[in-house]
Amino acid sequence: MIGHTENEIEIAAPVGFVWTKVNDVRAWPGLFTEYAAVEVLEEAEDRVTFRLTMHPDEQGRVWSWVSERWWDSERRTVRARRIEPGPFEYMNIAWTFEELAPDRTRMRWVQDFRMRPDAPVDDAGMTARINTNSVVQLEVIRERVERMRCGVVGFGAVPSNRRRGGDLRAMVSPATAGTTAGFCGAVRLAPGERVAEHYHPYSEEYLYLASGLLRVDLDGEPAELPADHALLIPRGVRHRLVNVGETEALAVFSLAPLAPRPELGHVDTEAAAPAREAAVAGQVP
């Protein structure tokens, strides 16, 4: 007899978000309840070899083994096998991720294996165990991935993007929360600092200044934006932000809808400025 199991679950999150979170093996101790530690041993663009260590079982035993995973990002499929099979003659796993809707994903596990003759449980017994445990772990993953979408994100919790100037951070985005319609964040600008001119071919931008004083150049025309004021930047309009005040400026931005692909979201029309450029209200750099 050969062991075979198939289990699946639907998750209220975009397929790309589920794919990224579930395939981050370093984060598995926070995604599964059964794993205590993960050690990445070797890594490439489309595969990873790692050691999994479980929490102690009822008898206090700690199980650990080395596995390998490789994936096809376009087809949203993953294959895995145990390099150290332990009680198995072999253990092969297939994962598939299917988009059901913009914010709904079906994740499916298929496991094929054979137990060693001297294993403490036979193929039928292990099939029953895996089916029971898979239902539990899939539900845990669903709950935790969906909860990630509603998490509070701090300014310092995401990487800084300084490519166009300023300290800009996309805080609620497809990457951090699985957003499907747009994203938002904030940018800090020191006095005299600017965000270089660019435009968004697919998105409107909504800009709110929490503190400081900005000049926003719209297709070359300057507009003053004081604190506690907001501004719409229409799709396709070139814009540049310049801190013309004497204190740090903090601006909150939101863009919608999303571009078809992240790299299409911005088009640069000038090079980034030095970190602290002297600015005069009304002057176009």
Image (cartoon, rainbow, N blue to C red):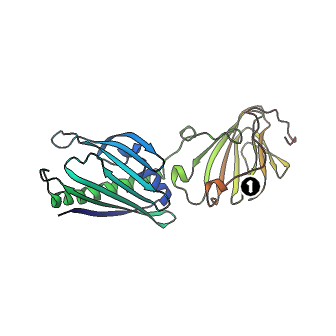
Residue type beneath disc 1: Leu
| Quarter assignment of residue 156 | top right
List the residue tagged with mark 1. Answer: 232
Q: Quadrant of the C terminus?
A: top right
Q: How far from the left and from the top, in percent, is residue 10?
A: 39, 63
Residue 110 image position (x, y, % from top left): 31, 61
Where residue 45 appears, as percent x and y from the top left, is 48, 48
Q: Position of residue 21 (x, y in %)?
A: 44, 51
Please give the name of the residue rendered at 29% of the width and 64% of the height, measured from the top-left corner: 6
Left or right placement of residue 96 versus residue 168 in this view: left
Q: Residue at x 24, y 60 (%)?
A: 131
Where, by quadrant of the figure, is residue 54 drawn?
Answer: top left
Note whether 163 is above or below 109 in the view shown: above
User: How many residues crowd around disc 1 within 10 Å: few (fewer than 14), some, or many (20 or more)?
Assistant: few
Left or right placement of residue 70 versus residue 166 in this view: left
Residue drawn at 28 percent across, 57 percent down? 134
